[in-house]
Image: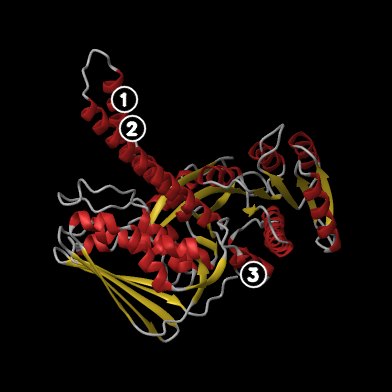
Amino acid sequence: MNLTEKPKVLIVDDERGLRSGTKRLLESEGYSVETAANGTDGVKLGTENDFDLAIIDLKMPDIDGTEVLKEITKAKPNTICFIATAYASYDTAIESTKLGAYSYIPKPFTPEELLDNLRRGYDRRVLLLEAEKLRKEREERLLEIAFEKTRLNTIINSITDGVLVVNKTGELVLFNAAALNYFDLDRIIIGEYILRILPEEVSNLINKIIGSEKYIDKSFSSQIELKPDKELIVDVTCSSVPHPDGTLAGVVAVVRNITETKKIEAVKSQFVNMVAHELKTPVAAVLGFINLINDESFKVSESQRKDYLNRSFKRLTTLLEMVNDLMDISRMETKKKEREIVELDIVEIIKSCGDLLEMELKKKGIQLSYSVSENIPLIKADSNEMNRLFMNILGNAMKYNTDNGKISITVFQSGSYIVSKIADTGIGLKPEDKEKLFNEFFRVKSEKTRNIPGTGLGLSIVKRIVDSYNGKIIVDSEYGKGTTFTVWIPIKLNTN
């Protein structure tokens, strides 16, 4: 490819207006653009022509976008593909990444977002083509490459994946800074026998190739945890490097960071386990109550019937709250949650939340008190988000409090922040539980909390809301004595 040519872009989308509008924009920015109105045409164009970049809609009437992506990356592995969609999920993110997608472009996108993604993708395309070209120009002796002060070192070091090249005797030929970082090495020397200092799993992969002493057209891959507690997980792929005569010259090892992908998979697994625990039991209970009511052979009194219905109502209400929480988290992650920014009085927000909980507080004999400084400034925020924030914290202060306990609320100004302290005299937290408090699906498990309903998502939502306003939240707790949440919300907010 001649890098002085216009970058070639393929747009595959069934929305006519989006296709034509995007084409006009990109052509005005110096791109050469072709379009396809459906997945079938997109596959044909993308596999028969050499495009630098491809923008593929995820949802199309004839062929799913992931299938189009699969066919294009199979035929043209160096084409940088983007998935454009308004329906992003963990599943599609993982699947598309595995199939070769470079990134997501969420719909609707701004011209700046699109152009920024394409610029980064084109930079990646250039690096791939240069690397491919250099691989074809390998010298008879790979050690010679390491000593050339050429563009090769610049290109290799600009790649975020780690790269190691060793000859067939295990001596180091070439490496980049990313490889040093991944393997936590301060210094390695060209020509050094590298296998003794690499992680055992990596050395074993390399030895599978150089141990044969002849060229084999095969790669070996393994996912390796380089730092404990899943702090750093990498995918290492080792491939044979041939001499021009077809004999084995050495091995190239490419190290790719897959920690975030693994975290996504862990969250998905955690979600499945949570669903099994949180949904199965209450749904089974509701079905049981309904069966008892409908079973004519079982004489159910009117008071029992009402009790069964009330229990079912409470169970289903909790499940609906969990679904709403999950939807809110999804909207926050994809930044699709609409905000209406207005001037708000935090004190009024907190007091209205307290009023809504009045009946429940009376049932437990909990006293609610306020200490509010004078002339608290207004803030600019979304009313629904602020209500959700403080209702979650107050709700927890009530649920995890003792009978006849107390909740004390203090509001004051500190510099550019409105500070709200919500302290309870409840069961408190152990240090190990406090560290996990804002994690999704985390709930304190003990004899005291066994019968307290909840989804384990409320405080995660609280943390996300506070962070979105550039605020902060701190938890102080002593087991058996109570918990205090302190929330800082800026007075002047950047709402963009």
Check if mark 1's residue and mark 2's residue have beta carbons within 8 Å: no
Q: Earlier in the sequence, mark 1 or mark 2?
A: 2
Query: Which x, y percent locates residue 98?
Result: 56, 44
User: Is 280 rendered above or below residue 410?
Assistant: above
Q: Nearer the viewer, residue 470 or 81?
A: 470
Q: SS of the residue at dot 1? A: helix
Q: Which mark is residue 154?
A: 3
333 displayed left or right of 152: left
Q: Which mark is residue 283?
A: 2
Label 3: few (<14), some (14–19) or many (≥20) C-alpha neighbours in 10 Å: few
Q: Hey, which residue is sitting farthest bottom in the picture?
A: 415
Displayed quadrant of residue 27: bottom right
**Residue at point 38% right, 58% down?**
460
Check if mark 1's residue and mark 3's residue have beta carbons within 8 Å: no
Q: Earlier in the sequence, mark 2 or mark 3?
A: 3
Amino acid under disc 2: Val
User: Is 341 rendered above or below residue 48?
Assistant: below
Q: For the residues marked 1 and 2, what is the alpha-carbon distance in whole angstroms?
A: 11 Å
41 displayed left or right of 410: right
Please tell me whether mark 1 or mark 3 is closer to you in this view: 1
Amino acid under disc 1: Ile
Q: Which mark is residue 439?
A: none
Provide the residue designation for mark 1: 290
**Residue at point 45% right, 74% down?**
345
